[in-house]
Image: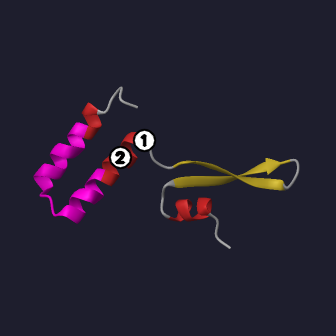
Amino acid sequence: MTTALERLCERGVLDRRREPCPLTRSAWRYTPALTRQALLIQAVEQLCGTLGISNVERQQMAAVVRHGSQGVW
């Protein structure tokens, strides 16, 4: 059975690597594959594509996310 974490790895949201574990001999360590800012930019670009927004407007929105979201999080 595929877990939610494995699905997130398949989608590129998480990275994972094996690490030693005293109880099970090895375990997976999951870490974010993208920064919060990169994930937000990706989500905005995907939304723009769904809504049919032009490439110029997409670039403008990505610039706002890239430069305007600093300090918000």
**How far apart are labels 1 and 2 at the CA level?**
6 Å
Q: Residue 36 at what x, y percent from top left?
A: 42, 41
Question: Is residue 25 positioned above or below 72 on the image?
Answer: below
In the image, 14: left or right of 37? right
Q: Residue 18 at what x, y percent from top left?
A: 71, 54
Q: Are marks 1 and 2 in contact (CB under 8 Å)?
A: yes
Q: Nearer the viewer, residue 29 or 72?
A: 72
Q: Provide the secondary structure element on which disc 1 rests.
A: helix
Quadrant in which the N terminus appears: bottom right
Q: Residue at x 64, y 65 (%)?
A: 3
In the image, 65: left or right of 8? left
Main SS, magenta region, reads helix
Can you identify the residue that label 2 sits on?
40
Question: Is residue 55 positioned above or below 2 on the image?
Answer: above
Q: Residue 23 at what x, y percent from top left?
A: 88, 51
Give the residues in magenta. Answer: 44-64
What is the three-letter code of the residue carrying label 2?
A: Leu
Q: Provide the secondary structure element on which disc 2 rests.
A: helix
What is the three-letter code of the residue carrying label 1?
A: Arg
Q: Residue at x 33, y 53 (%)?
A: 43
- Quarter of image, res 71: top left
Q: Residue furthest top?
A: 71
Q: Residue at x 18, y 48 (%)?
A: 59
